[in-house]
Amino acid sequence: MDGDLWGLFFIVLAGFLAGGTYALWKTNRALAVALGGCTALAVAAGVLRLGYL
């Protein structure tokens, strides 16, 4: 059960990071791209933690 909670945490974190990426896109594209990369890593960590791959 502990792994499931960590996976869910990473997926929720990815949602917040995606929102920040969307908000920053018009003002600072370089930072938005970096935040998008972090979003992709958080999604990957969540999916791997939940055992879907």
Image: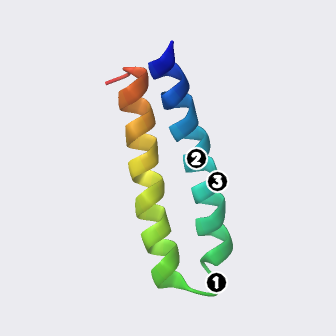
Quadrant of res 37: bottom left
- For badge 2, the amino acid type reads Leu
Whole-angstrom CA distance, mark 2 to mark 1, is: 22 Å
Which residue lies under the disc numbered 1? Answer: 26
- For badge 3, the amino acid type reads Phe
Which residue lies under the disc numbered 3? Answer: 16
Q: Disc 3 or disc 1, which is closer to the eye?
A: 3
Quadrant of res 26: bottom right
State the mark number for residue 10.
none
Residue 20 lies, in percent from the top left, at 64, 65
Q: Crowding near pointer 1: few (<14 within 10 Å), some, many (20+)? A: few
Q: Crowding near pointer 2: few (<14 within 10 Å), some, many (20+)? A: some
16 to the left or right of 33: right
In the image, farthest residue toward the bottom: 27
- For badge 1, the amino acid type reads Lys
SS at mark 1? Answer: loop
Residue at the (51%, 39%) spot, across then down: 10
In the image, farthest residue toward the left: 53
Residue at the (55%, 24%) spot, across then down: 5
Which residue lies under the disc numbered 2? Answer: 13
- In the image, residue 40 sits, relative to residue 50, either above or below, namely below
- In the image, residue 8 sits, relative to residue 30, either above or below, namely above
Query: In the rendered image, which quarter contains the C terminus?
Result: top left
